[in-house]
Structure formats: C-alpha cells, structure tokens
Image (cartoon, rainbow, N blue to C red):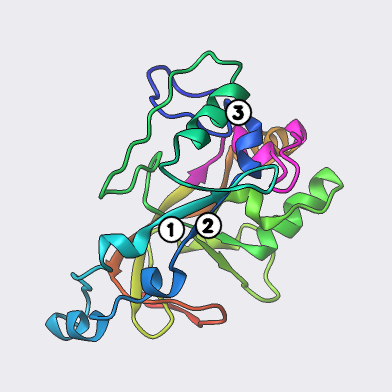
Amino acid sequence: MGAPVGFPYLTGREAHEMLLYRPRFRHPKKAARPANLAEAEELSPIHNSVPADPGDFALDVETASGEVLAIDDPALLRQLAARTGGNHSLTLLRSERAMTDCRPISLFSLQTAAQLGDEVGSVLDKRRFRANVYLDLGTVGGFSENAFVGHKLRLGPKVVISVLERDPRCQMITLDPDTAAPNPEVLRNVARGHEGTAGVYVAVLAEGLIRSGDPVELLD
C-alpha cells in the first residue's frame, strides 16, 4: 500500500530508509516540561494551555550514516531526495498542529505485539506499530485494547482519554524499525485475522504528563 492519491508528505511508505533517520529534541528536558508548566496547570485542572518556548522544540536528525543534522539543514533534504531517486522536490513544513493520518493519539498493547509475532513466527519490535502509548495489560491476551473502544481511561494521575475506534493498519507495520526491511506477512496477517486493525485511536479529554510505568484505569 502506497500513499493515498494527493497525499503531500514523503514518508517511510515511499522511502523505507527514512526509518533509519532518528529525530530527537535538542533540548529534551525543556521540550517535555516547560518552565511555566505549574502556572499553566493552575489555570485549569484538565488543560495545559501553555507549551514550551518554540526554541525549546529545536530538532536534530541522526542520519543513517550517523551524521547529525539540524532539521532545517538543506543537506538533510538533499539526502532524503536522493533516497527517492531524485523524483521528488522536497520542502520542510512546520505546523503548530499535528499532521497525523487520522487521530492524534494511538494506544497499542505489548500483548498484541506478542500475539502478532507468534502468528507470523517472528519477534516483532513494538516500535513498528508506531503508537504514542504502549500498554502492558498483564496476563490478558492480545487485542484486549479493543474492549476499550467507547470507554474512557485515565493514564497516570491526570490524563483522561476517550477511546474512539480500532486502528486500521497500512504498509508501515511491515517495516523493521532498525533495518527498514519489509515483512509483508505482518500486514497480511492483520488483514486476514484481525479485520485490518491493531491497536486503538483515542481523543484527549484531560491533558497532562504521563510516564513509563503509570497505571491505567478504566473510568466507565
């Protein structure tokens, strides 16, 4: 499956090697926790309206060869264009809003990754499913997160989400996050055995910080 007709962005669907490029915040602590976070939280218990300073969101990208380039370095665009065979004219687009295919947040359980790996006969790195939040649901089976659709969850002490729908999958889950090598059987298996979906999409009702190991609570 390639990009939809008219889709304006270059992604790993068109250039698998893009998965070997590693973006990172230049100032990770500042980007994750702006200095005025406490004041923002006092404005409303469910909404953090004050983000970090734009300068704190500066990005660097480690290329497949290990070179580190600023996100706006023309050399980075030249490298990416070369990997497409020179068939694309690339420009850098910055947006203050998320540029997601469908919903802004996705959840995916470790149990689902393990089950899919068993079904295709290979250990599957959870990162190939590109979730925002990975859940450890304990002793339950894979795809148990499907039962959360239509319900609200609390993640950690503050964040509240509404689980909207199952996550329809595309070619991206066939790509190994460390090598970019494709395994088409992963997507075929999801299509045959799981109605083409794996994981769930959610909407955020109450904002906040979440951390590894935070509890997950079903609210309704």
Q: Is residue 184 magenta?
A: yes
Q: Residue at x 43, y 82 (%)?
A: 156
Earlier in the chain: of badge 2 and badge 3, it is: 3
Quadrant location of the C terminus? Answer: bottom left
Q: Amino acid at mark 1?
A: Val
Q: Is residue 101 left or right of residue 168?
A: left
Residue 175 in sight: yes
Quadrant location of the N terminus? Answer: top right
The answer to the question of whether label 2 and label 1 lie on touching residues, with beta carbons closer than 8 A, is: yes
Looking at the image, is mark 2 or mark 3 nearer the viewer? 3
SS under mark 2: helix
Q: Is residue 126 left or right of residue 36?
A: right
Earlier in the chain: of badge 1 and badge 3, it is: 3
Q: Amino acid at mark 3?
A: Ala
The answer to the question of whether label 2 and label 3 lie on touching residues, with beta carbons closer than 8 A, is: no
Looking at the image, is mark 1 or mark 3 nearer the viewer? 3
**Which circle marks residue 15 in the picture?**
3
Answer above or below: position of 136 versus 37. Answer: above
Residue bearing mark 2: 146
Residue bearing mark 1: 149
Residue 153 in sight: no
Give the extent of the magenta segment: 167-185
State the separation of the CA atoms marked 2 and 1: 6 Å
